[in-house]
């Protein structure tokens, strides 16, 4: 419990929480971006008959 108290009450803890949130957001964005482009390339390759 002390961990969460330190995480959300100190400047360093808040910055760490913000960095973790940004990194998770970036990870989700890149996964969706890559999957979208893989599907698009697969559709294009199937349309060309490869």
Image: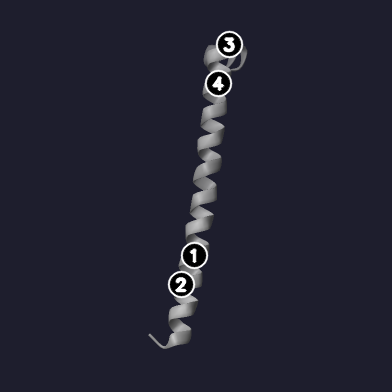
| Residue 31 screen position, x and y as percent | 49, 53
| Residue 21 screen position, x and y as percent | 56, 33
The residue that label 2 is drawn on is: 41
The residue that label 3 is drawn on is: 10
Label number found at residue 15? 4
User: How many residues crowd around disc 2 within 10 Å: few (fewer than 14), some, or many (20 or more)?
Assistant: few
Query: CB of mark 2 within 8 Å of CB of mark 1?
Result: yes
Element type at marker 2?
helix
Say whether residue 8 is left or right of residue 42: right
Query: CB of mark 3 within 8 Å of CB of mark 1?
Result: no
Q: In which quadrant is the N terminus drawn?
A: top right
Q: Residue at 51% across / 71% down in the picture?
A: 40
Q: In which quadrant is the C terminus drawn?
A: bottom left
User: How many residues crowd around disc 4 within 10 Å: few (fewer than 14), some, or many (20 or more)?
Assistant: few
| Residue 26 screen position, x and y as percent | 52, 43
User: How many residues crowd around disc 3 within 10 Å: few (fewer than 14), some, or many (20 or more)?
Assistant: few
Residue 13 picture quarter: top right
The residue that label 1 is drawn on is: 37
């Amino acid at each position: 419990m002390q961990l969460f108290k330190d995480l959300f009450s100190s400047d360093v803890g808040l910055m760490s929480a913000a960095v973790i949130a940004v990194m998770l957001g970036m990870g989700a964005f890149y996964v969706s971006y890559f999957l979208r482009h893989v599907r698009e390339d697969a559709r294009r390759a199937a349309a060309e008959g490869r």
